[in-house]
Amino acid sequence: MFEITPTEWTAIALSLRVATVATLVATPIGIALAWLLARREFWGKSALDAAIHLPLVLPPVVTGYLLLLTFGRRGLIGGWLADHLGIVFAFRWTGAALACGVMSFPLLVRPIRLSIEAVDRRLEQAAETLGAEPWRVFATITLPLALPGVLAGMVLGFAKAIGEFGATITFVSNIPGETQTISSAIYSLIQTPDGDTAALRLVSVSVVMAMAALVGSEWFARRATKRLHGH
Amino acid sequence: MVSLARVLAAFALLCGWAFSPAAAEDSNLVVFAAASMKNALDDVDAAYTAKTGVKIAASYAASSTLAKQIEQGAPADVFVSADTDWMDYATAKKAIKDATRVNLLGNSIVLVAPKDSKTAEVAIGPGFDLAKLAGDGKIATGDVTSVPVGKYAEAALEKLGAWQAAAPKFAMAESVRAALALVARNEAVLGIVYSTDAKVEPGVKIVGTFPADSHPPIVYPVAATVTAKPGAADYLAFLRTSAAKAIFERYGFKFLVSPTT
Amino acid sequence: MVRAARHQAAARALIMLRVEVSKQLGELAIEAAFESAGLVTGLFGASGAGKTSLINMIAGLSRPDRGIIAIDGEVLDDTKGRVHVPAHRRRIGYVFQDMRLFPHLDVRQNLDYGRRMNRLTEDPAQRARVTELLDIGHLLDRRPGRLSGGERQRVALGRALLARPRLLLLDEPLGSLDEDRKAEILPYLRRLRDEAMIPMVYVSHDADEMRQLATQVVVLRRGRVNAFGGAEVLPAAL
């Protein structure tokens, strides 16, 4: 009952890889956009904010389909990427990472934005008077002080990416070894006669991974906060 | 304080692992097959891997879903469809190597109920009242507008004059296996699935068989895609051997071609 | 080394700060013009008179609606000519009333921050001089959270100094301290004035403090310069 089959291991390993890549790539973009939203006023700001939160409110299948239209082999961007750079997303694990990254992006950006907003701008001003250019103020003062929020956002995003299903299966389908993540594997298993035991195994693995991610992040964030206040 | 250098080093390591080329080797084949093929084809694929060492990654879903994915550029080497319509569709989209196409298997559709159901066996013929049999419950099958089993079911019921009354009671699932699961879990009182599906699901029992002339013949064509790897030809040949035939027939499929050894 | 000498020479040459600005801040209309060439120019006035707003403009942290700010002929702000040198390029140090030490860095790193940001070479001799001047040598490994109010203010002073500014702004540095702490820090400020040789603009509402430190005083009242001169323009000692 507790023997994890090779197919299941493949799905677990793929989920971890997809979620890791999605989070690693999304984080710098998320930090940049969170900073923009937290510290700058500009024309189109609320539109940008809304666009970032779109994957939260759109049905995942819709997001997956939009990804297909944009990044599929015949998509606006996907076609160009495939023909000129040989980069293919549709039906590849890279596409799964893209789908998971897009779906988890709002959850990543929010805590980061909040923690950047919480950084005392007076400290940033002090840094300016000490000769720090804006990007150095960001790198040496804002980002380190916002770190707990960044970590929280990353873990939340990672957990969402591990569990993503609707957009992924629409954009990259369900190919074992390439795009069959834990969620898709469970989905296939519950339609397989006698697949319930295996499905439950994978469900338990998902739960354990999610719990580990959440507990790990709490610990991380608390450590970062302690370090900030010099205890 | 966690040094920036250490954080960047960890980041770089993670990137290295995450972005390293995917494990799938080049000789592995990707097969897109109708959902009803799952158990039988898994066994056939295992036999093929044992014989040649080539691993098969099989993606099972409704033939409609698979055909559209192939159209969108999915990296399938072989496509096994549960009806000729969807194979024709993929061919029309220039995704199939027509020369490799073979009508491999046949099947039949049956009426199933949960195994503990009180529903008695019925003879399905003209004047068959499916709606009455279902009572207040739902009848599960694949989506009648796209999924092959749903299309066969609707065709049969139209011919038997039972469609009008029963249509509102239908629970359309996205594949025949999803419909099968609904019945096995007692969420639907009846279901229309392939006889081969009923055979592998202990949670359902067959309560009736649709006459073969009530619907178009159920034919499973198989073909290689235009993007197929060279190894696909050997795999397709294996599907026609008597070894494969024995496995397919064990699961209740009809083998439509003469087997090679 | 050369830089420090240049700074010393400049201070001795008494940097000329020219301010001629207007700014509307809510109900307060700031309309101030003065030129200072002293070692310590005091900005004196009651709270709400506009002192902090004025030095924020000098520092480059805010911009005047109209006017000119120049140091030794170098234009920092000119609304007509559309010139605004950003704060990080002005080399004007600022000691804030609320200190604003970086909580995630220890004292040593706080002190070294300005040097790093300005990409200046290390000057251990100067570092030693400043830490000794302000008596903070024993606090170097501590985090700001572990310092007393007086210690924090001295570190803030040291941090601003070690960025080697050409002008130092101090906004009520004793404002958030109790009487004992004030008495403790005042001598450091006098030492700073006499030994560091960096021109300063010192903001306070306390006439006695001002009398002890400033060489020239600008009196601000409701956003306007009311008087300008030596210590005689301050209200009589109590």
Image (cartoon, coloured by chain):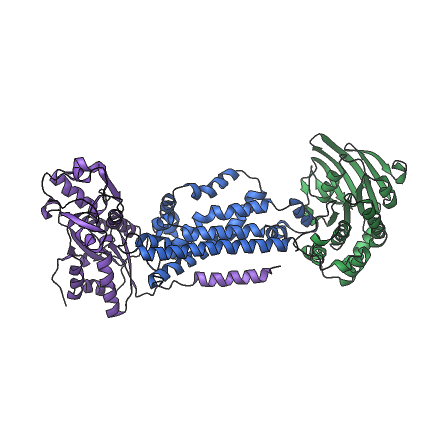
Chain colours: A blue, B purple, C green
> Up-down: is A66 above or below B105?
above
- Left or right of A110 in this view: C36: right
- Residue B28 is situated, as x and y percent measured from the top left of the image, at 30, 64
Number of residue marks: 0
Quadrant including the N terminus of chain A: bottom left
| Residue A89 at least partly seen | no
- Residue A39 is situated, as x and y percent measured from the top left of the image, at 59, 43
| Residue C7 at least partly seen | yes
- Left or right of B49 in this view: A108: right
Most foreground residue, B6 or C116: B6
Q: Quadrant of residue B21?
A: bottom left
- Residue B50 is situated, as x and y percent measured from the top left of the image, at 25, 69
Most foreground residue, A217 or B28: A217
Quadrant including the C terminus of chain A: bottom right
- Residue B73 is situated, as x and y percent measured from the top left of the image, at 31, 53
Rendered residue at 18%/63% (across/down): B244
Rendered residue at 57%/47% (across/down): A115
- Left or right of B220 in this view: C184: right
Most foreground residue, B73 or A83: B73
